[in-house]
Image (cartoon, rainbow, N blue to C red):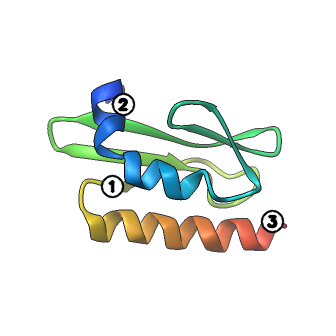
Amino acid sequence: MKHASQEALDRLESLLVKLRQFPVLRETNRGVFYLRSKAFLHFHEDPTGLFADVRLVPDGDFVRMPVSSGVEREHLLEAITQACAERC
């Protein structure tokens, strides 16, 4: 599964705007977010859709979550909100 292209990230722009509003997240490259000094979130694409790899627990592995639909994006935002609240 390849990292998301700029075209794929264009389709996720409304999600990226919401992610940029989290004060604890830092976007190092478009669509690549860090929490403190650790990689936290990035995106992938393949023929089955768009996916986010997100590290929901400190020192844990990345969890792959689908983000092709609005409902899937809302689930991701809920998970990130909870993860950020637990770490701050």
Within-10-Å neighbours for mark 2: few <14, some 14–19, many 20+: many
Instruction: Indicate the secondary structure of the residue bearing disc 2.
Output: loop
Query: Relative to 28, is 75 on the left or the right?
Result: left
**Residue 70 falls in which quadrant of the image?**
bottom left
- Please indicate, yes or no, whether residue 70 appears anywhere in the rendered image: yes
Image quarter in which the N terminus is found: top left
* Residue type at tag 2: Ala
Q: How far apart, in angstroms, are the residues tagged by discs 1 and 2?
A: 12 Å
Please determine whether, in this image, residue 74 is positioned above or below residue 22. Answer: below
**Residue designated by label 1:** 67
Q: Which residue is mark 3?
A: 87
The local secondary structure at tag 3 comes to: helix
Disc 3 crowd rating (10 Å Cα; few below 14, some 14-19, many 20+) is few
Q: Is residue 13 left or right of residue 49?
A: right
According to the picture, the residue beneath numbered tag 2 turns out to be 4
- Tell me: residue 41, above or below residue 4: below
Task: Residue type at mark 1: give it.
Answer: Val
Q: Position of residue 33 (x, y in %)?
A: 62, 41
Is residue 1 shown left or right of residue 52?
left
- Left or right: residue 19 versus residue 14 is right
Q: Quadrant of residue 8?
A: top left
Which amino acid is tagged 3? Arg
Q: Answer yes or no: do the residues labelled 3 and 1 have beta carbons within 8 Å? A: no
Residue 44 spot, x, y in % from top left: 37, 36
